[in-house]
């Protein structure tokens, strides 16, 4: 006789329960946020947005009142001749105002009292047509120490003729150079990174301005010590 085993409905139900349990275990758990907590979260987000809008509204007028700087091609329009006329009385001589026909533009023109160096100077900054820079300094109280400072201790490397006058050429060998002229009672120093052809154009205009102004008489008592 063979004994037949009958699995019966109990075993089948157990299998279905295990399968269902496995399905529940694999299903993702979705957290449920209480309504009060969700309301508080939404209120916090809305508050942050309102604070951001208020901050932008407060900062925007400041930005509008301070426009961004001009582009690299911006050239300020300084009237060198007018500033030179205003500085004549305090300088004791008529400062040069080279006329380059608009080829060079100036980004500053000023009289310096020389409180640091002891040598009062007339100073003008020029932007060249090739986007380089040449600084002009003029004084009637030049001395060797001051001259070394103005030319960055560059050695004398030769001479250049401009405006019918012989200028002393000093070159640092690092792209910056200077041209120096003692003429009609004052010393003029041109210093910058421009090419020598642009130095020549400005130097020629400087000589013409010097010759159009009264010559400066330097008394022995006014001569600065080295």
Image (cartoon, grey):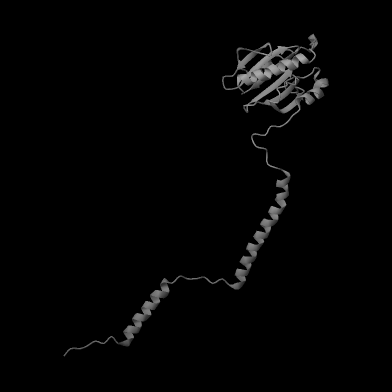
The x and y percentages for residue 8 are: 30, 87
The x and y percentages for residue 220 are: 79, 9
The x and y percentages for residue 73 are: 65, 34
Residue 184 lies in quadrant: top right
Residue found 73% across the figure and 45% down from its top: 65
132 and 168: which is toward the camera: 132
The x and y percentages for residue 57 are: 71, 53
Left/right placement of residue 84 relative to residue 12 reads right
In the image, residue 90 sits, relative to residue 16, either above or below, namely above
Left/right placement of residue 63 relative to residue 92 reads left
Extreme-left residue of the structure: 1
107 and 202: which is toward the camera: 202
Q: Quadrant of the C terminus?
A: top right
In the image, residue 168 sits, relative to residue 70, either above or below, namely above
126 and 20: which is toward the camera: 126
Residue found 66% across the figure and 62% down from its top: 47
Residue 200 lies in quadrant: top right
């Amino acid at each position: 006789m063979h004994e037949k085993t009958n699995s019966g409905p109990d075993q089948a139900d157990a299998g279905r329960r295990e399968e269902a349990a496995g399905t529940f275990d694999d299903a993702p758990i979705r957290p449920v946020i209480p309504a009060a907590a969700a309301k508080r979260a939404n209120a916090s987000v809305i508050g942050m947005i309102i604070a951001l809008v208020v901050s932008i509204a407060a900062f925007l007028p400041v930005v509008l009142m301070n426009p961004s700087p001009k582009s690299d091609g911006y050239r300020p329009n300084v009237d060198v001749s007018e500033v030179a006329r205003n500085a004549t009385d305090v300088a004791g001589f008529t400062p040069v105002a080279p006329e380059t026909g608009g080829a060079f533009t100036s980004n500053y023109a000023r009289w310096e009292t020389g409180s640091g160096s002891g040598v009062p100077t007339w100073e003008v900054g020029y932007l060249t047509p090739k986007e380089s820079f040449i600084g002009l300094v003029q004084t009637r109280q030049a001395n060797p120490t001051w001259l070394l400072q103005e030319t960055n201790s560059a050695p004398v490397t030769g001479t250049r003729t401009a405006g019918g006058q012989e200028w002393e050429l000093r070159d640092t060998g690092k792209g910056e150079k200077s041209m120096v002229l003692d003429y009609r009672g004052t010393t003029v120093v041109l210093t910058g990174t421009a090419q020598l052809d642009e130095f020549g154009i400005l130097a020629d205009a400087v000589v013409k301005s010097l010759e159009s102004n009264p010559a400066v008489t330097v008394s022995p008592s006014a001569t600065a010590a080295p």
